[in-house]
Amino acid sequence: MSRQVFLYDPPDRFVAGTVGLPGRRTFFLQASAGGRTTSVALEKTQVAALAERIDELLDEVVRRTGGNAPVPAVAPSELSDTAPLDAPVEEEFRVGTMALAWDGEEQRMVVEAQALVELEAESEEDLAEAEERLLQDDVNGPPMLRVRLTGTQARAFAKRALDVVNAGRPPCPLCSLPLDPEGHVCPRQNGYRREA
């Protein structure tokens, strides 16, 4: 079967969002344009890493171009998107590998998210080789979401993504693990529940 590529160039909307309550949230990337919507599931840490790397890459683009690239230093407030994900949220695939690039000719950020694929190999070397072949296979590789964003859209995406990640359960002031509404057994207190 040939690779399925969900291409948004440009998207009307590209956001990170969640479904569920804090502590039990499922994270999604969602792209939409022209009446179609694609949602892919991923881990909270993947969303955080993607947002941080987008900001770092945009900062590097600004630095290398001497400020001539159409990339704002911060996300413009008029592009702030706090709306929930478009319903229904139907997972196309779970993300395994992500990639970022800057297209200097088109002045666009390219975000790619590929489906998680389980590979079997007899050694670490065989596994690394199989992974590389799979990622380079443009015809039969795993499904992929590819989104091309302006610098402004990318900054707005990164800000919202970090806001979504940070909107979860607050951290314990002692151990930094998430506090649950029903209580928290803190390892720094040898397992005793903290009284309010």
Image: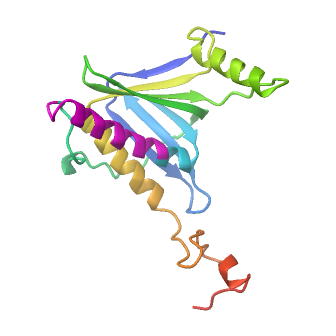
Q: Residue at x 55, y 63 (%)?
A: 22
Question: Is 49 or 85 nearer to us in this picture?
Answer: 49
- Residue 73 appears at what percent x and percent y? 21, 45
Q: Residue at x 62, y 58 (%)?
A: 24
Q: Start and end of the magenta stretch?
A: 49-68
Q: Can the viewer see residue 186 in this picture? A: no
Q: Residue at x 34, y 50 (%)?
A: 159
- Residue 8 appears at what percent x and percent y? 39, 24
Q: Please identify the quarter of the rendering in which residue 196 is found.
A: bottom right
Q: Residue at x 34, y 43 (%)?
A: 55
Quarter of the image for the N terminus: give it: top right
| Colour basis | rainbow
Question: Is 28 or 90 nearer to us in this picture?
Answer: 28
Q: Relative to residue 132, is residue 37 drawn left or right?
A: left
Q: Is residue 55 magenta?
A: yes
Q: Please identify the quarter of the rendering in which residue 4 is found.
A: top right
Q: Relative to residue 100, is residue 195 drawn left or right?
A: right
- Residue 19 appears at what percent x and percent y? 54, 51
Q: Is residue 56 magenta?
A: yes
Q: Please identify the quarter of the rendering in which residue 108 is found.
A: top left
- Magenta-colored segment: predominant secondary structure: helix
